[in-house]
Amino acid sequence: MVEVVIAVSVLAVAVATVLALLPLLTREMADSGDSLVAQRFSGAIEAEMRRLAGSGSLDTLATSIKPSDASSTLTLVAPRDGRDVREESASDVEEWAQYFAIELWQFSTPPLAYERAVGAVLPVQVRVSWPYKLRAQDGGAVRTEIEDRSSITFTVSLRR
């Protein structure tokens, strides 16, 4: 009888441990999936940069993308599925659904600094962070502080 009680208590401890780890594992899986979506943004970011540059030169776009030491710069947003990358002010995605923040900065030192005289290539440093905005209780959106977001960084360049 003592053996049965010990076996049941060991089983109970094992089940309790697995149940305690379940939320952490679920959160890690979700963050891993979001990271995969964020890593696929380079083509969509380049397409949005081309749209913003329009038929003009890269100079127009370069003025809206600040140097890396600036506190704010051009910000793009995308929903959690990553299907629509747009400038934040022009996005038709509901504000609470703007899950990814995509911030673009120019490099401030050569060789990657944009040269207006040449203007053939505009390299930018990209930081994708999430969750950017979440749904509030009242149905609106709450912005998540940058310290509380996951993020990745990479470089994208736009050629004339």
Image: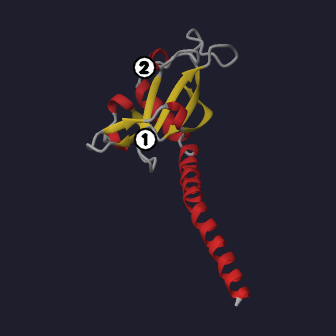
Question: Which residue in the structure is indicated by mark 1?
Answer: 78
Q: Quadrant of the C terminus?
A: top right
* Three-letter amino acid code at the position of disc 2: Gly
Secondary structure under badge 1? Answer: strand
Q: Disc number at residue 31?
A: none
Q: Nearer the viewer, residue 147 or 71?
A: 147
Residue 14 x %, y %? 66, 71
Q: Which residue extends farthest right?
A: 3
The residue pinned by badge 2 equals 56
* Residue drawn at (56%, 32%) of the image: 127
Q: Position of residue 51 (x, y in %)?
A: 41, 31
Where on the picture, by quarter, is residue 3? bottom right
Nearer the observer, disc 1 or disc 2?
A: 1
Mark 1 in CB contact with mark 2 (< 8 angstroms):
no
Q: Which comes sooner in the sequence, label 1 or label 2?
A: 2
Q: Quadrant of residue 120?
A: top right
Give residue 57's position: percent from left, percent from top. Answer: 47, 18
Relative to 94, is 159 above or below? above
The residue nearer to you, when weighing 56 against 18, is 18
* Residue sticking out furthest to the front: 2
- Give the CA distance from mark 1 to mark 2: 25 Å
Q: Is residue 44 visible?
A: yes
Residue 40 to residue 128: above or below: below
